[in-house]
């Protein structure tokens, strides 16, 4: 075991990320991505995010196993599986700088889409947010396409959550059931990722030392997030989440472009 002060900084960011994860069922690795990969490097930062989620995802998944949309979970896994394999290949071949730019741009696009939906439209343009119940062919193609692309992004960079969420938000309306369904998505997909990363030699003693420091901090955020879920206004919380995501995406993209 080794100790570095960077492990503490990465762990502190996990408190924020796992608070969001405990509330919504997604977002911990995306929120912490710039700090984690910035301090640990892309080669250790990605498997760090994968392994960090597993104990919490299995805990919550088993605790709330009766409150999961299994039908939608099946669709997610079937459509994400091919992308995971493609993403694992990209993780081994794409350069760290290119990877960071890809992560940053992806986060920015997702954040901007949701900032428009949850902030600009209702708060600035004063438009009432309406649920669109009509399930057209175009919407199905878009949502299923997000699942496939989300699998690729998650397999490569461990941040496919926002893309996969595009499908799940429209399919699963109850916030607890949505969170629990997303929890099982990450429990299963990250197990596959962890096995592949172990086989590739990405899990090192240095990485395990970082995890030992970060896990207790992640636990603090996760259990606070679970307790906060029943008190939260979903729209207000998502506004905060996507503003933070936009900041992180811009920061990562700009820093990576300057490093080229």
Image (cartoon, grey):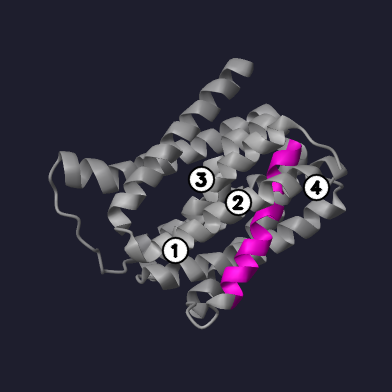
In-image side of 179 versus 90 (left or right): left
Instruction: Give the alpha-carbon distance from disc 4 to disc 2, as whole Å.
Output: 15 Å
Q: Along the polypeptide, which appears first: circle 1 or circle 2? A: 2
Q: Which residue is mark 3?
A: 16
Q: Residues within 10 Å of mark 4 (few under 14, many from 20)?
A: some
- Which quadrant: the N terminus? top right
Q: Residues within 10 Å of mark 2 (few under 14, many from 20)?
A: many
Residue 140 visible in the displayed image: no
Image coordinates of residue 78 in percent, x first then y, are: 60, 69
Residue 56 counted in the magenta span: yes
Q: Along the polypeptide, which appears first: circle 1 or circle 3? A: 3
Q: Which segment is the magenta one?
A: 43-62
Q: Along the polypeptide, which appears first: circle 4 or circle 2? A: 4
Q: Which residue is mark 2?
A: 218
Image coordinates of residue 206 in percent, x first then y, are: 83, 40
Q: Residue furthest bottom?
A: 66
State whether residue 95 is above or below residue 199: above
State whether residue 243 is above or below residue 155: above
Give yes or no for contact between labels 4 and 2 (Cβ–Cβ under 8 Å): no
- Which quadrant: the C terminus? top right
Q: Quadrant of residue 176?
A: bottom left
Q: Along the polypeptide, which appears first: circle 2 or circle 3? A: 3
Q: Which residue is mark 4?
A: 208
């Amino acid at each position: 075991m080794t100790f570095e002060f960077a492990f503490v900084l990465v762990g502190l960011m996990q408190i924020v990320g796992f608070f969001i994860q405990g509330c919504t069922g997604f977002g911990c690795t995306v929120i912490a991505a710039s700090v984690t990969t910035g301090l640990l490097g892309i080669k250790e930062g990605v498997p760090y995010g994968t392994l960090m989620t597993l104990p919490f995802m299995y805990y919550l998944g088993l605790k709330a196993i009766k409150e999961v949309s299994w039908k939608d979970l099946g669709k997610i896994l079937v459509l994400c599986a091919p992308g995971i394999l493609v993403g694992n290949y990209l993780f081994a071949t794409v350069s760290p700088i290119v990877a960071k730019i890809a992560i940053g741009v992806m986060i920015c696009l997702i954040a901007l889409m949701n900032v428009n939906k949850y902030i600009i439209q209702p708060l600035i343009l004063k438009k009432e947010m309406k649920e669109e119940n009509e399930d057209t062919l175009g919407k199905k193609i878009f949502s299923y396409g997000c699942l496939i692309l989300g699998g690729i992004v998650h397999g490569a960079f461990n941040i496919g959550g926002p893309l996969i969420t595009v499908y799940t938000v429209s399919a699963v309306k109850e916030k607890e059931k949505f969170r629990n369904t997303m929890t099982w998505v990450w429990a299963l997909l990250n197990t596959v990722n962890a096995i592949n990363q172990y086989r590739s030699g990405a899990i090192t003693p240095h990485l395990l030392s970082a995890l030992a420091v970060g896990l207790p901090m992640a636990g603090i955020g996760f259990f606070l997030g679970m307790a906060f879920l029943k008190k939260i206004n979903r729209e207000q919380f998502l506004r905060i989440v996507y503003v933070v995501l936009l900041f992180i995406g811009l920061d990562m993209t700009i820093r990576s472009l300057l490093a080229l």
